[in-house]
Amino acid sequence: MKRRKPSASRTLDAIAVKKILIVEDNQFLRTTTADILQLAGYDVIQAEHGKAGVERAQRDRPDMIVCDVEMPELDGYGVLHYLSNDPTTAMIPFIFLTSRDGAEEMRRGMSSGADDYLVKPFSEADLLATIEVRLKKSAILQREYGRPPQRLNEFIADASAQGGIPGIEVGDRPRKFASGQVLFAEGDATNHVYYVASGVVKVFRTDNYGKELIIELCKPGDFIGHMDVLKGLEYTSGAEVLESTELHMIPRKVFLDLMHRNRDVAMRFIRLLAGEVTQNQQRLLALAYASVRERTAQALLDLNDRFKESENKPQLSREDLAGMVGTAKESLIRALSDFKSDGWVSLSGKNVLIEDEAALKRFAGR
């Protein structure tokens, strides 16, 4: 591998001190590559085989992994498989090193989820250029989708920038929906993914007796229906507008094409899904083991946290609040009455105002 002194501009660009893990069983190539990257301003850590590479990646959380394909104990494909299935390392850019130069080998590497591919012997210029490009793309994708309203435009822009579908336009004019309008019901065909520009939408499921359990209250910046679109052809929950709302509607085909054609965009979106799954698991645990009063306290705290930056908090009916808690309306009212007597909350029409957040948190076990 021919070496030369890195240019000043490249060195300065890398000074953000990104950490790079090199996984390579050839000691000479590993140390030579490490020297080049260190001269370019990177913080480099090394692993001499695949198993050690997985352990170092999980422990040190590098900004990029450069990994040989053919190694003893665990090859590069195995390393990528382990790290891709670990939420803490799945988003780390991954570059394969291989001595095999061929379309079939490259196709296998990229289809396994690698971000790029370098064939040995590679030049210093190729190594540094590949790393710089992938780090820049990774920096774009580190932002999480699905919170402020401008995230939708970022999502579409990133998809196009990363080789997504050209010409996708969601537009600046979302559709308006009135309070009480149903977006979709359980069992309806998954025709769209919705993005909330303004207002509040409840996502819920119903039992055999028609009782609602509210899964989520979606506010500006949230996607709705995306998990069902990814899973299959039918919505597994219903969605209803709670107050005047504006929504962007992304057609199913457009959304799936974005996910399937671009790994970077898909991985960024997976981070959003992983967070939602974790929250839902915590709610299910609370429903299974917490008392009605504990669940009520948790629901009030969740609402307060979720809408604390919103100018207008949603005015939930007692039925909807009971649906969040997973109890009957009468049981919810008794719990609110107890909290009011304790001085933890006050009531103003439909609104429940938290007066003693610390006490509620202690009661809810937070």
Image: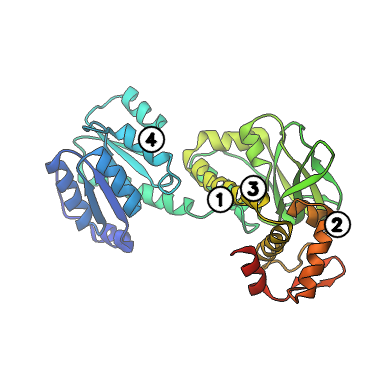
Residue 215 horizontal/vertical position (percent): 71, 48
- Residue contact at pointers 2 and 1, CB within 8 angstroms: no
Along the polypeptide, which appears first: circle 4 or circle 3? 4
Label 3 to label 1: alpha-carbon separation: 14 Å
Residue under pointer 1? 275
Q: Is residue 344 above or below residue 270?
A: below
Quadrant containing the C terminus is: bottom right
Depth check, front residue: 86 or 25: 86
Along the polypeptide, which appears first: circle 3 or circle 1? 1
Kindly report which numbered mark, 2 or 4, lies closer to the viewer in this rendering. 2
Q: Amino acid at mark 4?
A: His
Q: Is residue 102 left or right of residue 359?
A: left
Residue under pointer 2? 330
Label 2 to label 4: alpha-carbon separation: 50 Å
Which label is found at residue 81?
Answer: 4
Q: Amino acid at mark 2?
A: Glu
Along the polypeptide, which appears first: circle 2 or circle 4? 4
Can the viewer see residue 126?
Answer: no
Residue at the spot x=79%, y=66% of the render?
A: 336
- Residue contact at pointers 3 and 2, CB within 8 angstroms: no
Along the polypeptide, which appears first: circle 4 or circle 1? 4
Residue under pointer 3? 284
Q: Amino acid at mark 3?
A: Leu
Quadrant containing the N terminus is: top left
SS for tag 4? helix
Residue 352 horizontal/vertical position (percent): 79, 68
